[in-house]
């Protein structure tokens, strides 16, 4: 990931951090060390990195192919580690 993308994700997460309830959900799905703001990506950023459509990643999350956390009615996050695991 280039430094501009990293900085954008970091700043976006700092401006809109996860609530305590969302952090608990994330830890449940991805383990205790999952909530590191610089280690999460939106589906749009992850899809861009993988050259996929965000809908594909949503479908994979629902099918259990990748781990993700729904942090609001329409907003999902996935860990950078998960994205690296599937091939980026």
Image: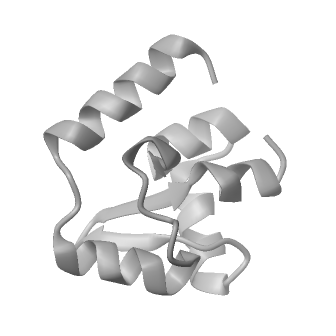
Q: Position of residue 16 (x, y in %)?
A: 16, 46
Residue appearing at x 15%, y 38% in the figure: 15
Residue appearing at x 36%, y 73% in the figure: 70
Q: Position of residue 11 (x, y in %)?
A: 27, 29
For this rendering, which residue is in front, 67 or 37?
37
Q: Residue furthest front?
A: 33
Vertical arrangement, residue 29 with respect to residue 78, above or below: below
Vertical arrangement, residue 77 with respect to residue 20, above or below: above
What quarter of the picture does the C terminus occupy?
Answer: top right
Q: How many marks?
A: 0
Left or right: 3 as drawn, with respect to 52: left
Figure quadrant of residue 59? bottom right
For this rendering, which residue is in front, 83 or 73?
83
Residue appearing at x 19%, y 74% in the figure: 20
Left or right: 37 as drawn, with respect to 12: right
Residue appearing at x 48%, y 25% in the figure: 6
What quarter of the picture does the N terminus occupy?
Answer: top right
Q: Position of residue 73 (x, y in %)?
A: 22, 73
Vertical arrangement, residue 65 with respect to residue 54, above or below: below
Q: How is the image coloured?
A: one colour
For this rendering, which residue is in front, 77 or 17?
17
Vertical arrangement, residue 51 with respect to residue 61, above or below: above
Q: Position of residue 62 (x, y in %)?
A: 57, 82
Q: Residue furthest right?
A: 87
């Amino acid at each position: 990931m280039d430094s501009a993308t990293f900085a954008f994700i970091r700043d976006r997460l700092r401006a809109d951090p996860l609530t305590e309830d969302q952090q608990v959900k994330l830890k449940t799905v991805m383990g205790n060390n999952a909530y590191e703001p610089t280690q999460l990506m939106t589906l749009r950023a992850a899809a861009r990195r993988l050259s996929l459509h965000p809908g594909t990643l949503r479908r994979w999350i629902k099918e259990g192919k990748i781990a993700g956390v729904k942090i609001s009615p329409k907003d999902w996050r996935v860990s950078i580690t998960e994205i690296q695991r599937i091939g980026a």
